[in-house]
Amino acid sequence: MGNSSSMLTQYDIEEVQEHSQRLFSQQEIVSLYQRFCQLDRNAKGFISADEFLSVPEFAMNPLSQRLLKMVDGLNFKDFVAFLSAFTAKASVQQKIKLIFKVYDSDDNGKVSFNDILEVLRDLSGSFISDKQREQVLTQLLKEAGYSKDSYLTLEDFVKVLGSSGLKMEVEVPVD
Amino acid sequence: MSGSQEKLKPSSSELDLDRPNIEDYLPSGASIQEPHGKLRLSDVLDISPILTEAAGAIVDDSFTRCFKSNPPEPWNWNVYLFPLWCFGVVFRYLILFPARAIVLTIGWIIFLSCFIPVHFLLEGNDALRKKLERVLVELICSFFVASWTGVVKYHGPRPSMRPKQVFVANHTSMIDFIILEQMTAFAVIMQKHPGWVGLLQSTILESVGCIWFNRSEAKDREIVAKKLRDHSQGADNNPLLIFPEGTCVNNQYSVMFKKGAFELGCTVCPIAIKYNKIFVDAFWNSRKQSFTIHLLQLMTSWAVVCDVWYLEPQNLRPGETPIEFAERVRDIISVRAGLKKVPWDGYLKYSLPSPKHRERKQQSFAESVLRRLEEK
């Protein structure tokens, strides 16, 4: 993929498609490339954090900083692979895996009580006190059969979220 | 990295204290249904609606769409049309462009040789000097328009010089101002630019009474508001022209109007400008090119074709706030010029959204959690 051209060859499209488990159609990949080039203002080959933040809808999102850590500096192939979790064809397992990664900020395969607390803090801001957040979380964990000291793994996430009919889909506009 | 790119900072809260609620306009996305029932662990761990909104914004968002250049469709895609297109390129660059450059140079020579004497010799006789300078500015703007073979169709009654009225228009490029100025010498309010444009601003445009502002200075807003008010009250000042979007938009969309022009206690006369995309994309994408390159691009295209509509003057209705007034006028202009309205503040090009929006989302999440905690 040339970093200065805005044209994808058929080989490029197929390579990106393979890398993201064929979850996007070729037309969608072309569309995503146009979007990628639009956000990557000086054709560096990746989108930097402040270029993501120049999208106001993204900057307003409470989880934008966490997501930034996951998407900052990705090249186009990895960018598409990241977004592939948001297709309709992606498995529930794949979607839960992405949610898990958002929680597991130190990437050690385990989500601790504090990890969940921090995400809760991003989501609720100053509108719930720290103490109240801890109380609520402890209670909810207990009711689900975990304790404050438990570490949740991906399997635990699948168990808790798998049955709730998870819907996490974004449509790629294709002109 | 272009020279004008600075790190985005959150906008000062005074800039958007009175903005209408963006949430009223934005699609509510995946979080439409209010969750019910007793709070469970899965409800707290399930961040999928928020992630979906974020990913949706990454994939496509209505703000970035406003600033996308739309070059005319290439028509040189087959073996018969290609030589024709090549001939066209040669003609444009080697014949049209030099001819236009010559016309523009002649125009400048005429203008400067009249303007400089008038400016200095008539220093005592203000009224006559102003009148002559006005005519001269209209003249040089006509030369500019001729240098891009501007074909402008004006509709509606020409602006008249009356006190207590301001003109507002949608903004696509700095050439909007030139196109309007060739018909009527407006006093425009503009961002102060560096370079040769800034030089022109501080010398020639001063003479028609233009007002400068500086986007990056927070306190600047009050100073400018006062200048606007003073100017609009004066009887023999040139009519004031304001671009309430505050930034150049790509002529397909309109961003939110700033209320400054609508709270001066004056009649607001809307002007709609629509460029014909087939000839050239007149949008000045200030992120991608400097004004000089933009002008050169215009001078090497076939023509700049546009329509200008002078629309019916509007007044603040009883019980209407300035923001509602601004939105109403924006609606009038957008309908006339075929623009889609988006609920964004144009200044988000230069600064991050205020933390208020994130806080609103946090508040609604917090309230939902606390409410469901009570349910059994």
Image (cartoon, rainbow, N blue to C red):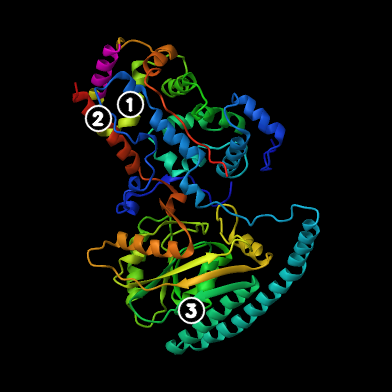
Query: Mark 1: which amino acid?
Result: Leu
Judge left or right: residue A2 versus residue B318.
right
Identify the residue at horizontal 47%, vertical 32% (top origin).
A68
The residue that mark 2 highlights is A128
Disc 3 to disc 2, C-alpha distance: 58 Å
Which is more N-terminal, label 2 or label 1?
A: 1
The residue that mark 3 highlights is B184
Identify the residue at horizontal 57%, vertical 73% (top origin).
B152
Query: Mark 3: which amino acid?
Result: Thr
- Residue B343 locus on image (x, y percent): 39, 51
Query: Mark 2: which amino acid?
Result: Ile
Query: Which image quadrant for residue A120?
Result: top left
Foreground pick, B221 / B62: B62
Crowding around mark 2 (Cα neighbors within 10 Å: few <14, some 14 to 19, many 20+) is some
Crowding around mark 1 (Cα neighbors within 10 Å: few <14, some 14 to 19, many 20+) is many
Local SS, label 2? loop
Question: Over which residues does the magenta segment extend?
Answer: A133-144
- Residue B273 locus on image (x, y percent): 50, 67
Disc 1 to disc 3, C-alpha distance: 58 Å
Q: Identify the chain of the residue marked 2, using the numbered disc in the image.
A: A
Identify the residue at horizontal 55%, vertical 42% (top origin).
A39
